[in-house]
Every structure is written in C-alpha cells, then in structure tokens.
Amino acid sequence: MQNRLYDYSPIVDRAPITWPGDARVAFYVGLNIEHFELGKPSTSINTTTAGLLPDPLNHGWRDYGPRVGIWRMIEVFDRHGIRPSALLNSDVAEQYPQIIEAGRARNWAWLAHGKNNSTLQPEVEADEEAYLADIVATIEKATGQRPRGWMGPALTETFKTPELVRELGLDYVLDWTADDQPFRLNVPGLLSVPYTLELNDLGIFTAHSISGADFVQIVKDQVDQLWEDSEHSGRVMSLALHPFVTGQAFRAKYLDQALEYVVNHAGVWTTTSDEIAAHYAATTAADA
C-alpha cells in the first residue's frame, strides 16, 4: 500500500527554510502529559505483570509521572526558560487539573494527544469525528487555548485522522517522524512537524537502558549535527520526554545538563511546536 498522506521529497532538493533571528535549529520539548486507565495494558517497564488486574507494578510506575516526576521536570524547564509543547491527553483535564494550572501559568503550548494513553486511535469504537471533537473541546476548555497540533496516543492514527483534525481547525500533526524539517501533507492546510522516536526518553532509557551521562552526550551530538546540517536550510530538533521516565530523581541532573547545552548553543531558537508550524506556514511556499 502506498502512502498517500505525503510525497517523497529528499531534503537536499528543497528550497531553503529560515528561522527567526537567523537561527539554524528550531528546538522544542515535547512533554507527554498522559493518563493511563487502570486495568488496560499500556506502556510498561515490566511486561510480566502487564496483563494483570490490577497491575500495581506498571501502573504505579506510570502514575509517578503526574504525582512527582513532572514537578521535578518543571523546575528544570523553568531554570532554562523552556515552554514545553504539552502533548495532552484530554482526560488529564479531569484527573490532574493542577498540572494544567501550572502549564497555563507558564504559557505552555497545548497539543491534543488523544483521550488517554490506554486507548489507541484505531481502537476508537465511536464515531471518530465526534471523539476527536470532544478531545479538542475538552482541552480548549481546560487550558483556555484551542490546540493547534495533534499527536495520537503512541503516535497512532486512522486513515481518516489527518483530515478530521484539519476539519477541527488544527494545523499540524507530529505522528509522522519522517523528517528534520516541517513539510506539507496531502491534506490542504495540514503540516507535519518533526517529532522523534530516537531522541525519546522511552526508547533511550527503558528500551535501550542508556545511562544519564550518555543521554546528555546524545542530546549534544544531535544539536551539533543538526547545526552542521543547517548551514543552508533550517532544521528542527525535538526532545520527547515522559514524566514517569525522565522525571525520576536520578535523571534530573542529566536533563538539566542536556537542556543547558542546547539552549546556550549558537544558532538555536528555543521555541514550541506551535511556533515552528506557524513560522513555516507563513514563510514557505505552498509547494515547498
């Protein structure tokens, strides 16, 4: 089956793109703020008990994020002047309203990230259009900001999702991690903005058991290489984080070290995915 959502476009053949202030790399933090339903197998640190009801081992690990981990991470973000792009499950509005209050006070960008992270988009049994409309409306009411972007739980979509989120007024999706630059999808008015599976704490720390010190080096290597690549055309660097992973106490200093390097790197625009999408849409031709 051919992918009709976007066409092949080698990065070396494109018109140059620019970022504000002559920056070469646009950097944002994608902060996953998620709710997991009790009794549904979800992201797990130990699959042995993942099918049990209840599953205190895995559910408690995930629940550490909104209870403890995110507050530790917020201190680090504040220290470096970072406004995360909050990838928000709409169930968070009811379950953890204090997190939304903290994000509103800091002017975070809010993206729609499904209802919860125990329900993947293709599992939606009800009408998807109504399901998505409820997610967007719930987030808008809770945050005071209508989301501009979408990322599906576990980066999942149906074949209808891109068109439906565009009909709801959203401008971009993060699900297709195929590029270092934004690009237009074959849905009029809808962009893909780079997100990352590789520079993602779930993979780095839980799948590959990479140390905190090595995480810092990976982040440094990423921004250094993207800066080199961007001599003639801008690039995007995303850092994907989960509070139940990077919010662990022994990782906090490594997040601090990594962010200090990036935000003080020459030619880096520290921003949000919303601002990246808006700037790209406003400064590039429709056939870019």
Image (spheres, rainbow, N blue to C red):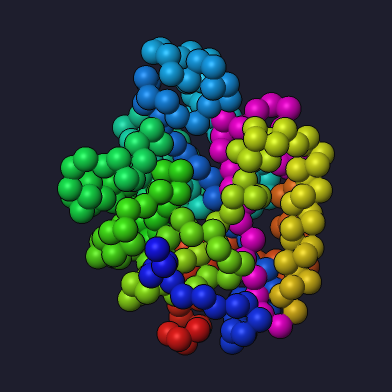
User: x%, y% of residue 287?
Assistant: 45, 86
**63 with respect to 156 (left or right):** right
244 up-or-down from 121: above or below = above
Q: In terms of image quadrants, where is residue 170?
A: bottom left
**Quadrant for the N terminus in the image:** bottom left
Q: Is residue 216 magenta?
A: no
Q: Determine if the magenta segment contains residue 241.
A: yes
Residue beneath the point at 50% across and 42% down: 32
Q: Decide if residue 75 is on the left or right side of residue 222.
A: left
Camera sees residue 110? no
Q: Is residue 188 above or below residue 173?
A: below
Q: Is residue 66 left or right of residue 170?
A: right
Q: What residue lies at 75% left-to-right and 69% top-to-bottom? A: 227
Q: Residue at x 31, y 32 (%)?
A: 94
**How far across and how far down the image is residue 48, in percent?**
54, 17
Q: Nearer the viewer, residue 246 or 122?
A: 122
Which quadrant holds residue 14? bottom right
Q: Which residues are magenta?
A: 232-257
